[in-house]
Amino acid sequence: MKIIKEIHFNREVKVFEPRPKNLFSMLEESAEKYADKEALVMNGIQLTYKDMRVKVEKIAGNLQKSMCVKKGDRVALLLGNSIEFSLLVFACAKLGAIAVPLNTRLKETEVSYMLGQSGSRLLFVDDEFLPKVESMRDEDSISTVQYFFLVGNGTPQRKDYLPYEILEQTSTVEEVFVAEDDPLFIMYTSGTTGLPKGAVGSHIGAIHSSMNYQMVLNTNHEAKTLIAVPLFHVTGLIGQLFHMIRVGGTSVIMRRYQTEEFIRLTAEEQVSFLFNVPTIYIMMMSHDNFSSYNYANVSCIAYGGAPMSSETIYKLKKYFPNARLHNAYGATETASPATIMPRSYHEAKLDSVGLPVPVGDLIVVNDEDEPCLPGEVGELLIKGPMVVEGYWDNESANQASFWNGYWRSGDLAMIDSDGFVYIVDRKKDLINRGGEKIFCIEVENVLYNHPKVLEAAVVGVPDALFGEVVKAVIVPKTGEIIKKEEIRDFVAERLANYKVPKLIVFASELPRNPGGKILKNVLRNRQTQENES
């Protein structure tokens, strides 16, 4: 594959040539090459690439003919991880319809807002989340929904739920021209404040992200992944499912992450590619049954979303000796990866999130949007075909979030002279202690290296003398007892004194929004507890 420049969404970007013309074409290509190979596996059900393509075309035909779904219509999915979820996304892509994956952890008011804001015409729900839909059926915000489909064996109070199975009846689909710049999905960002924004991902974006992973991770049709992170997020949907479809690999799907089941499936299914947040790897390796299985097939481990301690990296290398480790950084707005750690790098780069993806263009700018020199810290801006076109029906957010063809990440970063990217902090999370700037992530990285710390979050809180001081909220590992002075001494040995947490809180868990992001505003605003000092 070669890289050339083209104009997409009024931006000049680097693109791969050749490439699939849309997402369904990507499935078609793999179905032609690997017809009898397993594409999707879940709970004893296996679909080959040929099976998957046939089912997707049947679903698309029934949606088109019976439900009158046309190009541009929004189709909402309130589903747990499943084969049905996977097929529906590709069926929408075949029709040029726009999938709206909804976070199943959301409250009814949040789901209702997203359905109304997106103007979704159809809603698929499985039996576990049926009560949420039942409780909001009469709300005006979801009046655009014309068809409700039930996946599973739930018993709705109303009779107008259609069974998902009718979509797999024999049907043909009339061809629809779907351009690569057409919208593919609306994925709502799990912002920590304010209303969520619907990021509009495109076919070209999802395809290029899949190809970026393929090139950097060197994956092929022999790859087999275990999807336990939600398919309504870009990591599960693009980093794993679409990525595997691109290379002709296999996706083993778990409805949700459960440590013991994840360990068993990794070994028994001979999984070769894992992609998770660091916490999952920690939980996995800490489980009593972990050492009972063999993981010789695991050849690639990707991670992102939170700092990975050197202790965890050491353990991964020890227990998965045949695996390459790749840190990755991205966002909903970048359709998964913006940077990926290459296969080989100097140990001094261990804190980096890697190099820009092959078609990515990343710069760091100061407060005046002037380019920073290598080694200088500023806001990270990202451009490329994988970056979303914008936010659905939200011009103010588009104006604030895009500049000169780049998406403003809101992350403070540094790019070194070798091109490696380092995420320093969220721009809004910078602590100003008496004029001294403190990056929360720097302190968090140190805390994650403490052998008794499972999770940690650092925020700035008001102080009469310094303006702000450092507060750390720490979740100890199971069975561990940590003293506050032990934490302060540990940090003081590694960082300047002014970066040592003045306030320390021990908690059983960190507050998170439905998307899994730590709610630092909650940590800042929470009243001082009796166990602070």
Image: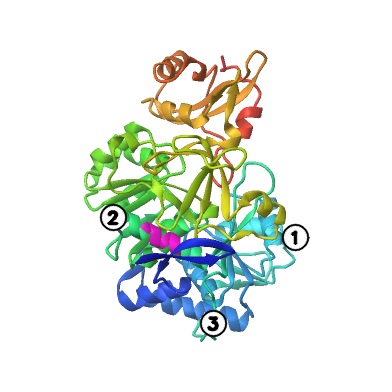
Q: Where is residue 310 drawn, in percent x and y?
A: 34, 32
Query: Of the residues shown, which amino acid type is indicated by label 3?
Result: Gly
Residue 398 locus on image (x, y percent): 66, 54
Gap between marks 3 and 1, in whole Å?
A: 28 Å
Tell which circle, 2 or 1, labels the residue nearer the N-terminal end.
Answer: 1
**Residue tagged 1:** 141
Question: Which residue is label 2 attached to?
Answer: 272
- 43 left or right, relative to 12: left
Q: Mark 2 Cα within 10 Å, few/some/many (few <14, many 20+)?
A: many
Q: Secondary structure at mark 1?
A: helix
Name the kind of residue labelled 1 in the image: Ser
> Residue at horizontal 26%, vertical 56%?
270
The magenta-colored residue range is 208-213
- Asked if one can make out residue 432 in the rendered structure from this viewpoint, the answer is yes
**Dominant SS in magenta:** helix
- The mark total stands at 3
